[in-house]
Every structure is written in C-alpha cells, then in structure tokens.
Image (spheres, coloured by chain):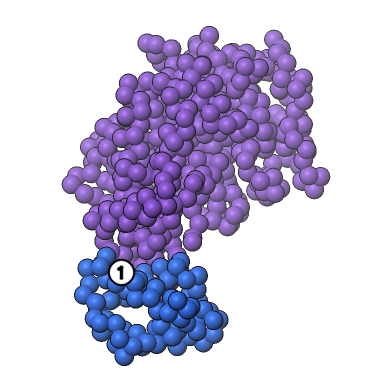
Amino acid sequence: MPRNSPVCLRAAIAAAGGLSSRLSVGPSSSASWNELAGESVLNCHAAELSGHSVVLAVMDPFAAAAAMIQFDGIVRRMVLYPPDLSREHLDFVAETAEADVIVTDQPVPLEVNARVVVLEPGDMRHSSERHSEASPLETEWILLTSGTTGRPKLVQHCLRSLIADIEIGRVPSTPVVWATFYDIRRYGGLHIFLDALCSGASMVLSNAQESLGDFLTRAGESGVTNISGTPSHWRRALMSSWAGQIAPAYLRLSGEIADQSILNSLRSQYPQARIAHTFASTEAGVAFSVKDEQMGFPLEILDRTPDVDIKVVDSTLRVRSERTASRYLGANSRPLKDVDGFVDTGDALELRNGRYYLVGRRDGIVNVGGFKVHPEEVEAVINRHPAVAMSLVKAKKNPITGALVVADVVLKNSLSSEEQGAHQRDILQFCRGELDAHKVPALLRFVLSLDVSESGKMVRRDA
Amino acid sequence: MNREMEIRAEIIDQFKQVALEQDKTLAPLTDELSLLDSGLDSLCFAVVVVRLENALGVDPFSSDEDVRFPVTFGDFVGFYEHAAQ
C-alpha cells in the first residue's frame, strides 16, 4: 500500500491540493476537483445509496466522474458500466454484482430487478452541504471487460489497487493537463482519471458523442500536456488531419502491443514529447512502463519495478502486484489469480537478445498447418512498410492447412489501382523477407479503415 | 476466352506466382502431372486455393458436396471448372 493511501476519493482530492485544477468535458461542463467532491449528486440520493451495491450506468462522462468521486467511500460496491456497452447486459451485470440500485441518466428497461435512480440535471447543482464522512467504506470498484461468451466479465478492484502506483499529492513543477482517448469507465481511462485526481492535475475528458477531430481540438485548446491511448487510438489520430492540434510533453500507449512503427511515427509527429508504452490490463493493473521508445521491454525493467513480480509460464506473461484486481464476480467465474497471486495476462512473450517482445494474445493464435502464427507479429511487420498506416491480420479457414492468415491494410495515401497492385506485391515481398513462410499473408486487401472498438482496440474477427 | 479457358489460365498463373514467391521449382503443368510432383508443398496449395477463391469467386473445397481431393493437375482444373458451373 502506498504511504498515506487515502481512504476515499474525496480524501484524495483534499490531500492532492490541486486547488485550481479542473475536470472538463466541454465548455459547458467544467468544475474543479473540490467542486466535484462537494457537488450534490448524493445530496438527493445519499440515503438510497449508502451501503448499497450500485451500477453506475450514465452516458455523460462528467456526471460519471462526479458520481465516482461522491460514491466512493459511501456505497458498498460501484460497478462502472461503460457508455458504449449494450444495455442488454444491464440485467446480467446488476444480478452478478448483486446490485440493488442502478444509477442512470437514460431510460432503463422495466424488467431490471433493481431500484433505478435517474439522475436529473438538477442533481448536479452545487451544494455546500457535504455527505457525512464519519467512516468511509472501502468501496469495491467493479470494472467490466469483454468476455469470450459475449457477456462482460466483472473484475473487482478497490481504490488501493487502482492507485497503488500513483503518488498522492506530488506537486509537478509545471501544471499538468491530462487527456485520454479512453472513456474513464474503462481501466485505461480510469487510471488516468485517478492519476490526475490524486496528483492535482487538470483533465480533459473524452466524450463518446464527439468526433476525434473535436476531441483533439478541445484537448489542444485546453493545453493538454499528457495524453494516453491505445496504439489504435494513436494510429487513427496520426491518420487524421488533427494530430497537430495537440503538442503534448508526454504521451503514453497502452492496451495493445506498441510496435516500432507507431513509436517511430509518434516520435516524428511530436518531437518534443516523452513517449512511454505501458503494460497494463484491467485484471493485471499497471505492470510497468517502457521509456526507451523501443518495442518490447528490457529484462532490467523487472529490477526497476520492485513492487511488481513477473514470471513467464508457457511463454505467457504473469503479473503479481498490489495493482492487480482481486477477483472476478459471479458464481461460476474462474479464479483471477493462481495460488501464488499471479494474474495470467494471456499475452504471449518471446525473449530475443535480452529483451522481451509481446507477440500477441494466446487465444488469438492461428494454427497454419501445425505452425503457430500470432496475427500481431505479422501486423508489426506489415506496419513497418512505409506506405502502411495500419493493418489487421485474420485467420481464414483453409481445406489444406486448416487455416491461413490474410491481411486487411490501410494505406497512408490513396493510390490508383495500378499503384495498389505494385504496393501489394511490395508489402508481401517485404513480409517474405521478414517472416517464416506460413506467417506471410496469403492475401492482402486494401481497405479504407479498420474497426476499432470503444475500448480502443482493433476488432478481431476471423475472415 | 471462354470460362473454362479463363479458369485454366488463372490456375496456371497462380501456380507459377506462388512457386515464384515460395522459391519452388514448378514442374511443367500437364494434365497428367501428379500434384505431389508439381514442386508445390501444402502451404503453397493452401495459398493457391485462397488466391483462386479471391480471383474466381469459388472455393470448391468448401462446397457441401462430397469432395474428392484432386490428384493430378487435370483433376484440379476440372474441380474448379465443375465448381464454377
């Protein structure tokens, strides 16, 4: 546990002392952290919520932020329902979390078996009255991740595990303004939100209703200094004409493998920025951050993060630290950790010349005639081709080898069909020079865009 | 060029292209040539099948009919001609 670990978020805000720092989601929604801690979502509903298990299913990120601050320490359990997650799972999530209250700003289907509290705009009005902080509860924080069955998995954290790597009340030498492409109901965004809150920094929230261009413009106008997202978020930003709207001093990638091309592209777009890629997941928490702008991570990193234990079992990364989640909720859920407390990340690693490389997801392996292929390692090669902006490698069923890999590729510039043919041959030739034969895509198709999910990761489906 | 000639020409093209890409020496493509002696390995055939599906819009291997695997190059061409009908 970090020293002076706050008992709840309102205590963290008081300890951070970022008096002038603000949270904003647009010109109309902006407040200081102190105002948020004193705002009155709870004033109308304190008695209904205190000690209960609550699903927070609001669309408005600003209301979500205020509610998180005010519910922490008051409710027994708080489930963060991402705004993009289909409402069809609401009943399942509420039941699994044994939630008796759903807090929302949207109409809720009547069959949901819990009390529904609908937030009205008036509930957000400022009030000097504060809820009693006599003895804050240690609220359970529940994050949702996509499960293999289509239903979300419920992952239990607590405030301590979520902020274990954040120094409370450290005062930065220059004002910090955070932004993130993630929604703050997802681990990647929540962690940034809590970092800003605990360190007294300002933060610009993203909003699902807003275009990438509007978000980057707003972030730039707010003087964003620090910004985080997945490699897919960043590729989209670089492909847009708005990448120049921001001039961050620090940028971070997480959530997907950061390959060398995206690190190099960010370096060339933002020459003044410090660039780090962080290994983190909802279950494993933040494990470590790599700052040398090379893909993969050096073995020494394990010595530099004494509070994180890492082991590699069956070529897959396992992580143990105070930042990992504690368990999955639900009667039939599998254990989140092994007997020694390690979380299996499902991320496959390769050790080459004293450096570990993340090669892909264990459950994403394609079997080509008995040889294993990680789509991500093929993508990393394709992305190195100078004409390529991003790529997606998929499995395609095959009568002879069981499966083959094929690739969808987004080019940096649009080309005539003749030029496309030449590029197609050139990219495949490049792959053959870099990859074993069974890893080279059998087909390469040019597409205008690739699907990126709301969690910022490329949508992976078989061809 | 009629459809059958078109199919044959496309198959010959793909055999040559894949052999070139995979650095294989292709035997002369006569109808009697046994596929096992063609110089292509199973990965090459897998790629040929995907490319032909892309070029011709048919994958005879995925049809519901009882598939008898072609043995000679002539069988292979006939297999695609039949599927394209």
- Identify which residue is drawn at 73% across, 16% down: A125
User: Which picture quadrant has residue B38?
Assistant: bottom left
Q: Is residue A99 left or right of residue A392?
A: right
The subunit letter for the residue under badge 1 reads: B
x then y, percent, for residue A450: 49, 47
x then y, percent, for residue A412: 40, 41
Chain A, chosen colour in render: purple
x then y, percent, for residue B72: 34, 88
Give the answer, above or below, for where A289 lies relative to B66.
Answer: above
Quadrant of the image containing the N terminus of chain A: top left
Could you say which is closer to the camera, residue A451 or residue A46?
A451
The reply to whether residue A287 is in sight is: no
Chain B, chosen colour in render: blue
Residue ranking furthest to the right = A110
Could you say which is closer to the camera, residue A442 or residue B25?
B25
- Give the residue number, with chain letter if any, for mark 1: B18
Could you say which is closer to the camera, residue A74 or residue A315?
A315
Q: Is residue A90 left or right of residue A256?
A: right
x then y, percent, for residue B51: 40, 68
- Identify which residue is drawn at 28% across, 76% down: B41
Marker count (numbered): 1
Give the answer, above or below, for where A331 lies relative to A36.
Answer: below
- Identify which residue is drawn at 18% across, 47% down: A353
- Identify which residue is drawn at 52% across, 47% down: A451
Give the answer, above or below, for where A174 lies relative to A430.
Answer: above
The reply to whether residue A149 is in sight is: yes
Q: Is residue A330 left or right of residue B21?
A: right
Amino acid type for the residue under numbered disc 1: Val
| Label 1 CA crowd tier, 10 Å (few <14, some 14–19, many 20+) | many
Residue ranking furthest to the left = A353
Q: Secondary structure at mark 1?
A: helix
Residue ranking furthest to the bottom = B32
